[in-house]
Amino acid sequence: MYSHAEAERPPGARVARIEKIHSGRFCNSERVEQLAQYKQEEALLLRNERIQIYDQYLQLMKGLLLILMLPVFSAHAQQSFEKKISEAARTLLCDPPDEKHPVTLKAKLVVEKDSVAVIVKAALAPGWHVYQFVPSSLPYIPIEHVLQFPETLTAVGTWIRTDPMTSVDDPGVLIYEKEAVFIHKAMRKEAGKAKGFVRAGLYYQTCNLNQCLPPVEEVFELDMEKP
């Protein structure tokens, strides 16, 4: 009877079997029976070959579809992460600044799968400002970012920041008033739960129209396990 091993015999073996049937010592009825059996086997073999080709075609199409959809999935995940960052930055509340403490800072981690974002937010009292850019000819001290990732993370890109405004009193100087947000992204080096602490903060000088305070460095230790 038909077997899987026999169905996979090479085409030459099929021809040889037909010749054997015709040249063998069979009566007409036996030869007809042998040929009928052979045709059934050939039909089943052809059917299995078609099924195999169709399965290969399906696997190929699945692979192509996955390749085509990867950018869509990636874009969707990125949009979801960006929305999460925006919401975290919006709801992150600094302590109310005042004349004694004209600048207050807060920092937060946002984690989604293997993506991480560090948010540093500054709130400024009315009339006070910090510097984003200062020409070398002026004595003011611009912001310097403090950022240190644990070994489990690798930094991605540069700081994303609120657009500064041009100082009215000092041409060429860029400043922040009222509020400023700074974001830096990172990725886990390996899949799984990242551990360690992220150090993030600012070194800055704040001024108003009457005075400039000494520069200050404020740094936060953010636990990766408790974002």
Image (spheres, rainbow, N blue to C red):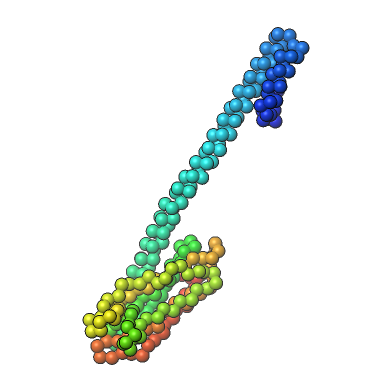
| Visible residue check, residue 93 | no
> What residue occupies the far left of the structure in this picture?
168
Q: Nearer the viewer, residue 181 or 161?
A: 161
- Residue 73 versus residue 114 in the image, above or below: above
Residue 27 horizontal side relative to residue 73, left or right: right
**Quadrant occupied by the N terminus:** top right
> What residue occupies the far right of the structure in this picture?
25
Residue at left 29%, top 81%? 173
Q: In which image quadrant can residue 146 be found?
A: bottom left
Q: Position of residue 211 (x, y in %)?
A: 28, 91
Q: Position of residue 157 (x, y in %)?
A: 43, 68
Q: Nearer the viewer, residue 198 or 38?
A: 38
Q: Position of residue 158 (x, y in %)?
A: 42, 71
Residue at left 71%, top 18%? 19
Q: Position of residue 58 (x, y in %)?
A: 52, 38
- Residue 142 versus residue 12 in the image, above or below: below
Residue at left 32%, top 82%? 134
Residue 41 horizontal side relative to residue 158, left or right: right
> What residue occupies the far top of the structure in this picture?
28
Q: Nearer the viewer, residue 224 or 213?
A: 213
